[in-house]
């Protein structure tokens, strides 16, 4: 993993989201609704909800907006009918793409996702066609400029809490965990008031694909931009080495 800094990409995503906060707030709002439906509205007894709240705070979602979302979800349990769907496919030059969606209309989402792939010269494949190229990991990124703690001390906190790996990059620290250990590690860092630029369970590529052709790069960006604009799409993972 060393040498593959994710921080520039995360900052880029945040800048894009700052220009359209409605999108990221919609994504988190749906995740709150699903978490509340599955485990109740009390974060103390619902680790999934705690993780979504941490994600919301990392994206500068106001506390009152988070609380309103939880109350709304708790009051509308009967009407929360989002279904999680995962699509897998290929972009230019065999790049692998995974799309996670939460939707109340499967046909609409399937059509939109297929359209995004097609317009970028890619295609949607069958379940499992690319997911074997990724590992599911808890991933926490810490901006060095925001963290005053020494690298060794930060590493020990993370490893003692159950992290699998700690990588120091030029501008950030990356902490990787098994999915089941993610909450414990995130909460240990939170208890030490360590600011996190990103904290989520993600799909980490085992290998990366470089795109050197300008047309391929344009097509890949087209796919990612169209998926980013779709409110049903919660997250997109790919192995393009940007």
Image (cartoon, rainbow, N blue to C red):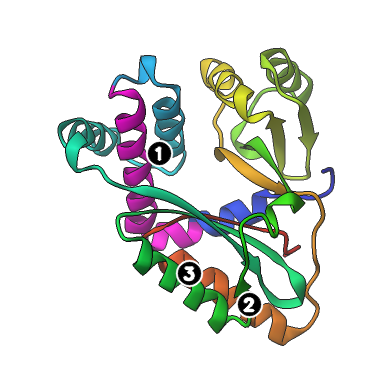
**Mark 1 Cα shell of 10 Å, populated few (<14), some (14-19), many (≥20):** many
Q: Position of residue 113 (x, y in %)?
A: 48, 69
85 part of magenta stretch: no
Whether residue 60 sits left or right of residue 239 in the image: it is left
Q: Which mark, by number, is residue 56?
A: 1
Q: Which SS class for mark 3?
A: helix
Which tag is nearer the camera, tag 3 or tag 1? 3
Q: Which residue does the image show at 38% across and 41% down from the upper left?
A: 31
Q: Position of residue 21 (x, y in %)?
A: 36, 56
Q: Position of residue 218 (x, y in %)?
A: 64, 81
Q: Position of residue 12 (x, y in %)?
A: 57, 59
- Residue 143 in sight here: no
**Range of residues picked out in magenta:** 15-41
Query: What residue did someone put label 3 on?
Result: 113
Quadrant of the image occupied by residue 162:
top right
Q: Which SS class for mark 1?
A: helix
- Residue 37 in sight here: yes
Tell me the CA gap for discs 1 and 2. Answer: 32 Å
Q: State whether the magenta stretch is mostly helix, strand or loop.
A: helix
| In the image, farthest residue toward the bottom | 215
Query: What residue did someone put label 2 on?
Result: 122
Say whether disc 1 or disc 2 marks the residue closer to the N-terminus: 1
Tell me the CA gap for discs 3 and 1. Answer: 25 Å
């Amino acid at each position: 993993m060393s040498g593959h800094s994710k921080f520039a990409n995360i900052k880029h995503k945040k800048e894009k989201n700052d220009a359209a906060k409605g999108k990221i707030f919609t994504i988190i709002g749906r995740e709150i609704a699903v978490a509340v439906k599955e485990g109740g509205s009390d974060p103390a007894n619902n680790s999934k909800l705690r993780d979504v709240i941490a994600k919301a705070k990392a994206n500068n979602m106001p506390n009152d907006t988070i609380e309103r979302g939880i109350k709304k979800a708790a009051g509308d349990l009967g009407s929360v009918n989002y279904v999680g769907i995962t699509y897998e496919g290929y972009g230019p030059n065999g790049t692998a793409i995974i799309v996670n969606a939460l939707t109340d209309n499967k046909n609409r989402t399937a059509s939109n996702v297929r359209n995004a792939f097609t317009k970028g010269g890619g295609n949607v494949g069958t379940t499992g066609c690319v997911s074997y190229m990724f590992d599911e990991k808890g991933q926490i990124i810490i901006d060095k400029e925001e963290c005053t703690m020494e690298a060794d001390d930060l590493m020990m906190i993370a490893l003692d809490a159950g992290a699998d790996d700690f990588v120091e990059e030029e501008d950030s620290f990356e902490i990787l965990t098994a999915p089941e250990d993610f909450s414990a590690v995130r909460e240990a860092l939170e208890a030490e008031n360590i600011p996190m630029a990103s904290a989520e369970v993600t799909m980490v590529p085992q290998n990366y694909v470089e795109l050197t052709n300008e047309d391929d790069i344009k097509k890949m960006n087209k796919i990612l931009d169209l998926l980013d604009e779709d409110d049903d799409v919660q997250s997109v993972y790919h192995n393009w080495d940007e």
